[in-house]
Image: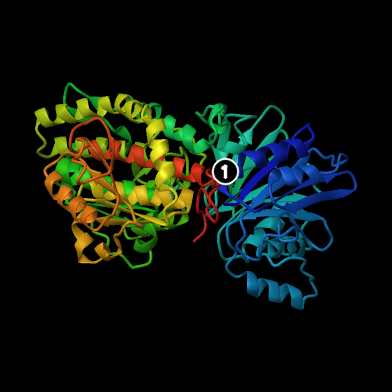
Amino acid sequence: MCGIVAYIGGKDAAPILLEGLARLEYRGYDSAGVAVAAKGGLKSVKKKGRVADLAAVVPARFKGTSGIGHTRWATHGEPSDVNSHPHLDGSGRFAVVHNGIIENADQLRAKLESEGVVFASETDTEVLAHLVAACAKETDELEDAVRAALSRVVGTYGIAVLDAEHPDRIVVARNGSPIVLGIGEKEMFAASDVAALVRYTRQVVHLDDGELATVRADGFQTFTQDARATAKQPSTVDVEEASYDTEGHAHYLIKEIHEQPGAVERTLSGRVDERFATAHLGGLNLDAREARAFRRVKILGCGSAYYSGELGAQLIEELARIPAHAEPASEFRYRNPVIEADTLYIAVSQSGETYDTLAAVQEIKRKGGRVLGVVNTVGSAIARECDGGVYLHAGPEISVASTKAFTSTAVAFALIALHFGRVHDLSPADGRRICAGLKALPGQIREILADEDRIAKLAAEYAHNAGMMFVGRVRGWPVAREGAQKLKEVSYVHAEAYPASELKHGPLALIGPELPTVAVVPDDELVEKNLTTMGEIRARHGRVLMVGHTAPDPKFAEDAILIPKNEPELDPILLGIPLQLLAYYAAVALERDVDKPRNLAKSVTVE
Ligand code: F6R
């Protein structure tokens, strides 16, 4: 989704802004623009297309030591040069970049037009530029003009405002859309995502909702919408710059699939206690008595985060015997949910910025519920909103399709389930069994990845079908759902996931030679039932690719991907890995834009 970057210091701003925007490309966008405060006023260039297209039209004499830049993902008005940000007021004094949605933009636009303001674009953001200009007539201070403008706005925003009359500062503000400040040596940065900053600094300050900041070359001040100063402590971002590079891989997606052994090691690091056969998760902020008191667990997330929550619910029920259920956060937040004091809520998010998940967390907290986060991005909005939680430490995930965060989330849930299990009735012997299984995961993921070439060949064969069915039972069911999700989002091949047990209640009608099925079949107590389902598919001339542990009789499946066996409760974590490779290589075979699938964005920060 949209990205913001801002710079102020002693250097030429434009190259830094363009470099920062290139680092935000992974989020998904359709146009880009920059503005700098130059001698004699603001200069701005914006263009539909890639950041490279923008860089190609930025003139050589585009000089200025403060500036703002933006990558836009269209919401109000089509992708076009004129709808791209920055947006300027009529006099050209102010330039604004904005992430989020101004809900009362139409009313504000009508009011401004009735006062004689002429709009250039269809966007909601342009309203902000004109509003700041109108409010600046009442004050000499840029900060006051921005605050006054924002007080008339309903909606979500992360903004940066550049003022030709105050080129020594940039004002930024946050409400529902992230803004992080980067502290350099006699220079300051601001961005919507640390990815744009890590090349220049590791010292950052995350703004809270309702907070603004004045950023100057020599520092920053933060304050609230009613002009009260706030005190912020900088934190250090623990991220390698190489995470934002494909490092020789054809795509981020395959790089991130291969990073999973290391990501899982980091998720587990320091948390597995073999002596007491449990997991240590200090960030949960729950003592044993509190952990015992919950009678139910409700897990919330969107898309792949929701499917990893389904794996989590299963792990918690199996290991801790606490009833647990996952639900899409996007549905939960709109159905006036009943919040129970003895239910523990867990929000799952890679980015920590997904608006629907954040809104669900806020709804729970408004009603007095206890909510934990399973989040990858340190310091993100969801992480800060929750009462405690577990960081994944999977490292930045750049490709739009989630892979390593999905796997690390499932591992984090296994740790939570082990911990809850051991404060309930999970025996030390079973706890030790799970500890050993967890420690075996990174090595087993490496073994699965070693089968990459064969999976790539199978993917190229299956990719040319019009669609695919994914089936699984109980432990295999969330794996099948995530497998279908991965295939459809990166290859655009239609994929449908069904519980294997439900096939004959309807979708079996679809089965035939033209619709192959991926069957997720762990070696557990349901293996015979799964084989029966596969037999039913084969009897209707459907081709079956089995992902499991034991080679099936050819009468059940034409193809099989076999993976190492772990403990039954942990097997689903491994079963998902070949399905990621299958989706990736299907997308490659079909020459898709693997890292940036059409119509999708990495973090969905709008409703
Ligand atoms: C799928 C995918 C999305 C995200 C979803 C939630 O590969 O990436 O379905 O899982 O948009 O995003 P986060 O985890 O950032 O809240």
Say few, some or many: other residues with alpha carbon within 10 Å of mark 1 (under 14 / 14 to 19 / 20 or more): many
Q: Is residue 491 above or below residue 453?
A: below
What's the colour scheme?
A: rainbow
Residue 371 shown left or right of residue 170 in the figure: left
Q: Is residue 388 above or below residue 532?
A: above
Relative placement, left or right, of 373 versus 116 is left
Residue 423 or residue 476, whichever sits in front: 476
Q: Which residue is mark 1?
A: 26
Residue 294 location, x and y as percent?
Answer: 19, 49
What's the amino acid at mark 1?
A: Tyr
Q: Residue at x 83, y 57 (%)?
A: 92
Residue 519 visible to an observer of this rendering: yes
Quadrant assignment, res 95: bottom right
Residue sitting at x 71%, y 40%: 17
Residue 308 in the figure: left or right of residue 205: left
Q: Position of residue 470 (x, y in %)?
A: 31, 52
Q: 469 or 295, which lies in front?
A: 469
User: Number of labelled discs?
Assistant: 1
Residue pictured at 71% horizontal, 63% vertical: 126
Q: Which quadrant holds residue 125? A: bottom right
Locate residue 79, reporting x and y percent.
67, 60
Q: Residue furthest bottom?
A: 114
Mark 1 residue element = helix
- Residue 597 is situated, as x and y percent measured from the top left of the image, at 53, 50
Q: Which residue extends farthest right?
A: 40
Which of the pair 363/579 is nearer the observer? 579
Residue 30 vertical position relative to residue 571 in the rendered view, above or below = below
Q: Tell me: is circle 1 under 8 Å from ligand 1.
A: no
Task: Answer yes or no: is residue 213 visible.
Answer: no
The one of 36 and 236 positioned closer to us in this rendering:
36
Give the residue at x 70% y 76%: 110
